[in-house]
Amino acid sequence: MKKLAVVAFGGNALLRGDQAGTIEEQEQNALDTCERLLTLINRDYNVVLTHGNGPQVGNILLANAAGNQVYNLPEMPLDICVAYSQGFIGYILEQQMRNVLRAHDLDRDVITIITQVLVDRDDPAFDNPIKPIGPYYTKEFADKMTAENGSIFREDPRGRGWRKVVASPKPLVISNQRSIERIARDGQIVIAVGGGGIPAFYVAENKLQGIDAVIDKDLASALLGGNINADKLFILTDIPKVCINYNTPQEKAIDRMSVRQAKQYLAEGHFAEGSMAPKIRAAIHFVKHTSRDAIITSAGLLGVDNGGTRISIV
Amino acid sequence: MKKLAVVAFGGNALLRGDQAGTIEEQEQNALDTCERLLTLINRDYNVVLTHGNGPQVGNILLANAAGNQVYNLPEMPLDICVAYSQGFIGYILEQQMRNVLRAHDLDRDVITIITQVLVDRDDPAFDNPIKPIGPYYTKEFADKMTAENGSIFREDPRGRGWRKVVASPKPLVISNQRSIERIARDGQIVIAVGGGGIPAFYVAENKLQGIDAVIDKDLASALLGGNINADKLFILTDIPKVCINYNTPQEKAIDRMSVRQAKQYLAEGHFAEGSMAPKIRAAIHFVKHTSRDAIITSAGLLGVDNGGTRISIV
């Protein structure tokens, strides 16, 4: 049986901070991203590709706010905007993946699955929303929205205005994970869990409902990888290897670490929150669950021998 | 083996003309739509659910135009907007379908697949774009856009301004149709081919690319139904049965017609273009391809004995 890999790309692999986000730019980035997968595909891996959506959902939120202002369109909540972004990013990744496979005479199919992820209504993250999303507003507007619908706003530390914050609850159940596994093991490249999944919970016995929240895409990918018994989890980032003492004279790149070491480095504060720390936690989750390795590296080193930092059970 | 049905809903089943399109309205409509499927599910059909996206993609185009005006966001072309709408509508249909199944103790899973549809670059429809999309503009703005990117605009017959028109080419290949069939025959309710699919063609040997066009969702659904050898195609509309001499004193509802009769009525102009005529053509396509029946009816009569108009091979 072929090995199965879950590969998690960041949303900025498709829209870099220095780009405006035209469709031509994003398609080219998607093509580059898909070409990075060739090494794994040539090594005969089955692949589930997951991706972030930060820059894209940011633009979708802005467009919705503008549509409300200019054309009085109804506001779309965050879960809907995540669904938009899954359709969008999944589509361009799937299209460029087909182009890459065809250019290399590889006979694999590609499929994009819209993915909801169940979270816990009582997740403590809901008591402390910290993830900023959407446009910057004036304090007056923010106060008005809070009064109207309970949205929580925080002032931007760089003085750009007030911004809505939402919770980032833990992913619990990935919908359609059985299908994702089956289709991937059948040899198709599956694109799923976009943006960490569309967060939803049961507000009543028979009422599943989306919520204004975002799920960490690396954690959702690790959960999926564990549940479908993937042989490897790749978490892609901007740097080739994880470092301790990052950005100091003592900076040291790590080739390999055990779960115990990774936890110790985490506790010692080597990894920045909102950046490397959640990736390390996601890797630990996967390794503990499967006893298999997780690899954190840059897209260019995906599937390359000794590329990146390997996190193992011991 | 269970029977397999393809059921095509209109986009207005989820956003009626008299509604603003808030998410609460659209979720409620999605719930109602999904409840209509219960009769078929209780009759033990496997189901592929397809849907239109007219009103939703209209709002997405407006929001994008506004985002460009207010925040200088890059414009998103129509294929991307269709991808947004597939993510969005698929998500809310899947979620409400899960709620309906759970409320009725039915053990079926639901999966939404983003669907590209290949069209022919040389389809004559591209010489005569007729499908209006997006906002109404002034003549000056329309002329400017035509000069900039070759978009074609037509004046609205009701004087609301100038509107972009795009082609509606014939669907040729539904991507992932093998997976759609397999998953549906495995008992999952599959949501696919949203808005008729995201239209794409090969601009070079290895370069599949999306285009500014829309595909008739009934025709795409009929093509899918034929290709996956569905036992029945249901095309849903606002009226319980197809009528000849519609809206005249001689109006007559049709219970049953052969392909030959349907073609004759079409030729005699009984069915309005942009409304019933494309549904009849889609039904004919399916019946000729499979020798099985297509049924055109309202959602309320879905799966009910003798509900709707049955189109048969003879």
Image (cartoon, coloured by chain):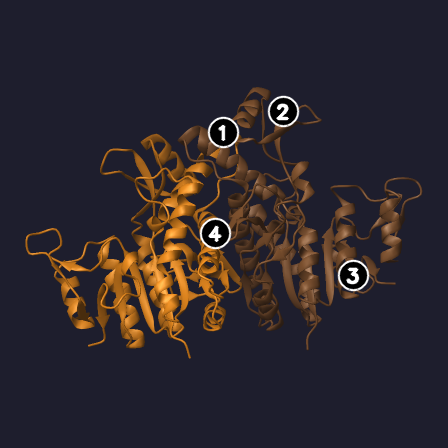
Chain colours: A orange, B brown
Q: Amino acid at mark 2?
A: Gly
- Mark 3: which amino acid? Val
| Label placed on residue B287 | 3
Q: Nearer the viewer, residue B86 or A204?
A: B86
When the figure is inspected, residue A256 is found, relative to residue B91, above or below; the finding is: below
Chain letter belonging to callout 1? A
Question: From the viewer's perspective, is the residue at label 3 or at label 4 nearer?
Answer: 3
Instruction: Give the answer, above or below, for where A156 lies relative to B118.
Output: above
Q: Would residue A136 appear left or right of A24 to someone viewing this image?
A: left
Give the farthest residue toward the bottom: A1
Above-or-below relation of B141 to A52: above
Question: Which residue lies under the disc numbered 4?
Answer: A83
Asked if the residue under mark 2 is in contact with the one under mark 1, i.e. CB atoms within 8 Å, the reply is: no
Q: Nearer the viewer, residue A57 or B175?
A: B175
The C terminus of chain B sits in image quarter: bottom right
Specify whether disc 4 shares its chain with disc 1.
Answer: yes
- Callout 4: 10 Å neighbours few (<14), some, many (20+)? many
* Chain at numbered mark 2: B
Question: Callout 2: few (<14), some (14-19), or many (20+) C-alpha neighbours within 10 Å?
Answer: some
* Residue at figure coordinates x 49%, y 60% from the top left: A113
Question: Where does label 1 land, which residue?
Answer: A70
CB of mark 1 within 8 Å of CB of mark 3?
Answer: no
First of labels 2, 3 by sequence position: 2
Residue flagged by tag 1: what amino acid is it? Val
The reply to the same-chain question for discs 2 and 3 is yes
Q: Is residue B129 visible?
A: no
Q: Residue A230's spot in the image, x, y percent?
A: 37, 73
Q: Which residue is disc 2 drawn over? A: B161
Across and down, in percent, residue A147 comes to 39, 38
| Cα distance in 3D space between marks 3 and 4 | 35 Å
* The disc label shown at residue B109, or none: none
